[in-house]
Image (spheres, helix red, strand yellow):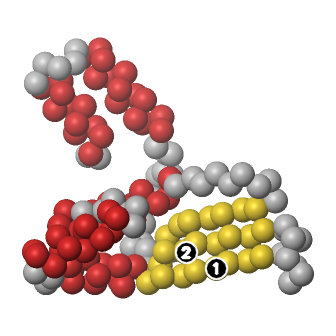
Amino acid sequence: MNEQRRQILQMLAEGKITADEAERLIDAVEREQPESPPGATFRPKPRPKYLRVVVNSEDDTSSDGPARVNVRVPLQLLRAGVRLTSLIPPQALAKVNDELNKSGVPIDLTQLKPQHIEELIEQLDDLTIDVDQPDTKVQVFCE
């Protein structure tokens, strides 16, 4: 049973929704999920290994021609960095947070946990970036 269906049944059991509402919600969830052919096995999505940022610009303002940026960061590096923050003494973290805030980066490193990175990685599939220039394309994704 998938997580959404379990949540719907839990709301029904708690009396938060009626049986008719639960049925409509379950139908909606089933419509969202693609039908798998009979006999097909469910394969979980492989765990991403890299964060990619790709920028392509056809703007010819530079003499070098179109601009292209292609950055590939190992996600294991991000995960290790998050684990390393737990080794920093609290007084040092407070100083780092103060300096980050002064620089316009409002991040509280004391709140950074490994599960937050995993949640971020899962949500990158839905990331959309708008660019003001029509001839520039930006992509951020995990692979």
Mark nearer the N terminus (2 vs 1): 2
Nearer to us in this view, 93 or 77:
93
Instruction: Using residue 4 as the reference point, say whether residue 134 is left or right of it.
Output: right
**Which disc is residue 52 wearing?**
2
Across and down, in percent, residue 116 comes to: 27, 63
Q: Quadrant of residue 109?
A: bottom left
* Residue at x-position 32% and y-position 22%: 23
The picture places residue 75, in percent across and down from the top left corner, at 40, 79
Q: Secondary structure at mark 2?
A: strand
Query: Eyeballing the image, is 70 above or below 123?
Result: below
Q: Report the disc number at residue 117.
A: none
Which residue is painted at 20% across and 31% down in the image? 9
Q: Report if residue 92 is visible in the image.
A: yes
**What's under tag 2, amino acid-wise?**
Arg
Res. 41 visible in picture: no
Provide the residue designation for mark 1. 70
**Quarter occupied by residue 6:** top left
Contact flag, marks 2 and 1 (Cβ < 8 Å): yes
